[in-house]
Image: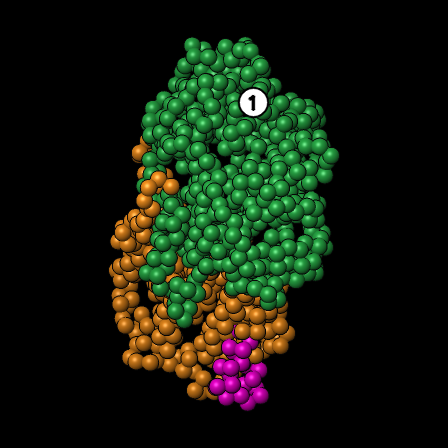
Chain colours: A green, B orange
Amino acid sequence: MLDHKGTVPVNVQDTNASPGATPILELSGISKRFPGVLALDDVGLKLYPGSVTALVGENGAGKSTIVKILTGIYQPDGGTIRIDGSAKRFATPHTATLSGVTAIHQETVLFDELSIAENIFLGHAPRNRLGLIDWSAMHTRAADMLANVGADVDPTAKLRDLGIANKHLVAVARALSVEARIVIMDEPTAALSHKEINELYALIESLRQTGKAILFISHKFDEIFKIADRFAVFRDGREIADGLIDDITPDDLVQMMVGRSVDQIFPARQHHQGTEVLRVAGYCHPTEFQDIGFSLHEGEILGFYGLVGSGRSEFMQALFGITKPSKGAVRIDGQIAVVRSPAEAINRGIVYVPEDRGKQGAVIGLPIFQNISLPSLSKTSRAGFIRLAEEFALARDYTARLDLRAASLDQDVGELSGGNQQKVVIAKWLATRPRVIILDEPTKGIDIGSKAAVHEFMAELASQGLAVIMVSSEIPEILGLSDRVIVMREGLMVEQFERDELTPEKLVRAAADIGEAA
Amino acid sequence: MDGSARILPDRLNSGFSSLIKSWETLLLAVAIAVFIVNTFTSPYFLDPWNLSDATFNFTEKAMIAFAMALLIISGEIDLSVAAIIAIASTAMGYAVQLGAETPTLVLVGVGVGLACGAFNGLLVTRLGLPSIVVTIGTMSLFRGLAFIILGDKAYTGYPADFAFFGQGYVWWVLSFELVLFVIVALIFAIILHRTSFGRTIYAIGNNPTAALFSGVRVQRVKFVLFLLTGLMSGIAAICLTSRLGSTRPSIAMGWELEIVTMVVLGGISILGGSGRIPGVVIAALILGMVTFGFGLLNVPGIVMSIFIGLLLIGVIALPRVLSQLVKAKAQ
């Protein structure tokens, strides 16, 4: 994996990026305070031309805040931003764009109802002599851009007809269309497939060749060591270290991020299987999945592996009562259970931590304590009247168990980082005292420190007798935690593996239906 | 993680400091200002009986506004409320022609209100249609039915004891309607702010998908809210019909917008998810006093609507303008 580092000699770009070269962008002494939190405390950051700088840190370390300052969304409370040595102030996103800074965000900001070309050129469309939009120029240029990023789509098609991965490529094309010199990529690979990720790497390489400075934010260590030249580590809003990636190892990076050594990423577990809790037989859906059947026991972690679109989430949502299956039966503790709504699923002890935290998991706009008590309102109320003291007690208890980082329990969940929002969602479910907990991509977009905490917590839940289903596309997570793994492909269960027969190659082969591992 | 578990504080800001900054405080200041201006501009304003009469300006509308507030917080709206008054009143008038007595009339009013609410609710929750479109449709439908039944006639001849709801007094200047308004306000404040049902309304308004994924029976809650709005429209129809003593098909024409104005002025976000009942109570008082004060001064109705329009925009824009001023000063 990392041999590319060893064999490639120091090249032109690396020389550029070495200390002594002038940075395009230089931040110094940047601070930003939010009510109750100092998000950034006197941090600096340098970006060099023709160089990829990986920005790493746990959730809440201040990465998103620095991106928002660089793109003109937030104003820093102190400090300076210099581009080519001269001080700049990014009062609006527009001034940031004019200074050559562009960002590709975690959740892309695009418009479903507009065409792909319009999305790419929104705000800076090519004009003809009359000042009107030059559609033919726009479509030709859009087609070029799309070809450059490897997206095989028609620029006149509407964006909503694209899959998530292609939408992402459109976002990349949009970022490039403004002729930026500084490109910020905020977890660009989170929603991409293996093939698309490789195409993105190639794209980043070509950006590097053309002398752009790239700030790359990622939680995936393998990709950081594959494509980054430099690194910068933030922790709790402070700058911890920066330097050349060749000088450090992944272990060093982890240590800098979390401030302690993580020698064992996955918790050691003893698998003792209890009685059967859940049995699913012949579960079918008209379009999404066919003939799903398995059983789940107390204290067991059952992994569901597969590619994006293999029907895992759709099946889980049917189990949770969101969508209706066309056929099939569910037994809980041997009793047939008809689950027609999430409310019924919760009553039966089945809960679901969805993949899309912001949309399906947390109720943004409500405070933390109200999010946690939402499915447990019948417990924190008498005859329909809420007991506020009991509600706060419940929230206090479960936020402490999950080590939630927040200012107070009445803080809006929308103000929390992704990892902390996930903790609120998990706390909400644990407060219902479930029998079966389904976690759909539980650590997606979460930094390595919180990831380990979530993993530890899942292991602890299983050891307390909870039956856990984990849907994950991350092989290490599946390998490290599952007692058993079901692989799905195109809506079908294609393989089942016991823990001791699991290998990454078997998983990949089963999921992709190929003779040899990629 | 790193050492001991952290216990988070319940709240960062004290109740007092958030009360000072609240919308209700702003509205209360406006209400006091309107009260003082009215006192100085008309010598008749401070008379207890005049003030009591003035409450009829808002009591019936406000009863519906409370239910509408819950509906708007949940992210829905009902524009057919005034038309429900018309059809409920027409139904009561029809029943009078058949010789119905007061208890039957009350049942008819409440029943028609509930039925109309259920009809709206079913269309929205079962068929998944947007409520603004559904209720614009049922607004024409209900009002149209009243016109077909009544034509250019009017129903009169309501029994004498039926007059109590709109014209009766419980004690001295306290009318039955005013007392009912206070009771309804309390009931809705308790439902919204003290019960788990009220909590689910906020959850739905902020994020219906996450609410559903958290086990909230979203469609059921919305249906109940339409039902409540229909019920309150039926009760308002009883009060209004009793007060007027007759039913014409044009009864309560245009009230739906006045009610929505009251709700929005009361600080309920038109986008759903936030707002409180006390705000709606104060907004009702403000609108009632403004209407009454202008009436005393013989100001034409159109000037009154212009003023209310400006008041609505002004009160909503004020916090935003203030915060921008504060921001500009800070930089």
- Closer to the camera in the image, A378 or B13: A378
The residue to which callout 1 is attached is A2
Rendered-image quadrant of the C terminus of chain B = top left
The magenta-colored residue range is B92-113
Q: Is residue B93 magenta?
A: yes
Rendered-image quadrant of the N terminus of chain B = top left
Residue A427 at x, y = what percent?
A: 43, 52
Which residue is rendered at x = 52% and y = 22% of the image? A228
Q: In the rendered view, does A382 fall on the left or right side of A481?
A: left
Q: Is residue B138 visible?
A: no
For the stretch drawn in magenta, what is the main secondary structure? helix
Which residue is rendered at x = 44% and y = 30% of the image? A254
Secondary structure beneath dot 1 equals loop
Q: Residues within 10 Å of mark 1 (few under 14, many from 20)?
A: few
Residue type pointed to by label 1: Leu
Residue A35 appears in which quarter of the rendering? top left
Which residue is rendered at x = 33% and y = 35% of the image? A38
Q: Is residue B210 magenta?
A: no
Residue A21 at x, y = what percent?
A: 45, 11
Q: In the rendered view, does B183 fall on the left or right side of B237?
A: left
Circle count: 1
- A143, above or below A191, in the image: above
Q: In the rendered view, does A430 fall on the left or right side of A237?
A: right
Which residue is rendered at x = 52% and y = 52% of the image? A272
Instruction: Give the letter of the chain under mark 1.
Output: A
Q: Is residue B126 visible?
A: yes
